[in-house]
Structures are given as structure tokens and as C-alpha cells.
Amino acid sequence: MIPCLIAQKYRILIASIAILTAGVILPQRSLASTGEPQNVIHQLRIYEIFDSNKKAFHDRFRDHAMRIMAKYNFKIVATWESKKDNRTEFVYLLEWPDEETMNDRWGKFLGDPEWIKIKKETGEINGPLVGEIQARTLYLTDYSPHKTLAK
């Protein structure tokens, strides 16, 4: 009886691992898909920025972050500034071929020695340039009018 229970628990464990890893192994699909593979994903990033040093933030993003991001093939679709309640936000949209690429490129960008140095220097001069950061990965629906947004 005991060997049978152990074997059953072992089979359940193997089945659970197979189910959990299927999302990693199988291609990503749209959350609202009818079976068509996901072509691209988008990432929405929202940064709280401060009115007291907003110019310094925009200078750093435009002159440094975008240039270094380009080195790692970031596709920035658009950038905006937004107001929510009493909060100023910098919002931008990225386009990626897949989640693996997105995660890889963010790791490379955040570990880039030049970016680390610029971020440290501008922070020492201007104080914190960014407060809360929100990031959302967006999956196209199968009825989206556009499959890609970047040029």
C-alpha cells in the first residue's frame, strides 16, 4: 500500500511540474487568442516624476537612456507626460518580439556600466528623478487592429 501511495504522489508531482513548465516551453499566445501565436508584445511603463526636477529627468531619458536603450534594440513606440491627481507621470510604450527578449534586454540595459554611472551622477546632482515605477506587459488580442506599432 505504501509503495503505491509513493508512486501516486510521484506521478502527481511529475504532472504538476509538466503543467507548470508548459508555459515556459510552449510559445506565448495572446490572452484572448483563438490559437494564433503572439506576434509581438508591448510593455507600458509609467514613472512618477517630480515637478521640481522634471527637466533633469527628461534630459536624462532623452539624451542618455534612449541612446543606451537603442544599443540593446529597445523599440520605443511613443513617450508621453501625464497628470494623475497631483502626480506627474512619464509614460512610454515599448515593443518586443517576445518576453524572453524583453527580460534579456532589460537586464543588459540595467547592468550597462555607462547607464549605472549616468544614473548615479544625475541622482547626485538633482536628487531622485523617479518615484514609483509601474510596468505592464501587454498582449495583443486576436482582434487588435494592429499587430505591431513600432516603425
Image (cartoon, rainbow, N blue to C red):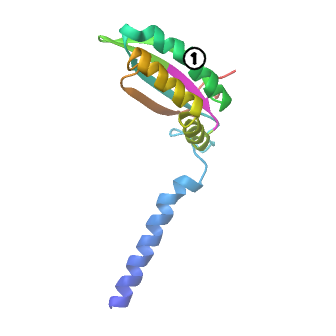
Query: Which residue is located at x 55 percent, y 28 percent?
Result: 115
Q: Secondary structure at mark 1?
A: strand
Quadrant into which the C terminus falls:
top right
**What span is in magenta?**
92-97
Extreme right residue here? 151
Instruction: Give percent across and percent down for residue 14.
Output: 47, 71
Instruction: Give percent across and percent down for residue 98.
Output: 61, 40
Residue 121 visible somewhere in the drawing: yes
Q: Nearer the viewer, residue 90 or 13?
A: 90
Query: Which residue is located at x 59 percent, y 44 percent?
Result: 100
| Magenta region includes residue 120 | no
Answer with the quarter of the image where residue 37 lies.
Answer: top right
Main SS type for the magenta part?
strand
Answer with the quarter of the image where residue 144 lies.
Answer: top right
Extreme left residue here? 86
84 on left or right of 38? left
Is 73 above or below relative to 47? below
Is 28 above or below relative to 85? below
Question: What kind of residue is marked 1?
Answer: Ala
Instruction: Give percent across and percent down for residue 95.
Output: 60, 29
Answer with the quarter of the image where residue 41 lies.
Answer: top right
Query: Which residue is located at x 62 percent, y 26 percent?
Result: 68
Instruction: Give percent across and percent down for residue 85.
Output: 30, 12
Residue with the mark numbered 1: 78
Residue 143 visible somewhere in the drawing: no
Query: Which residue is located at x 41 percent, y 15 percent?
Result: 126
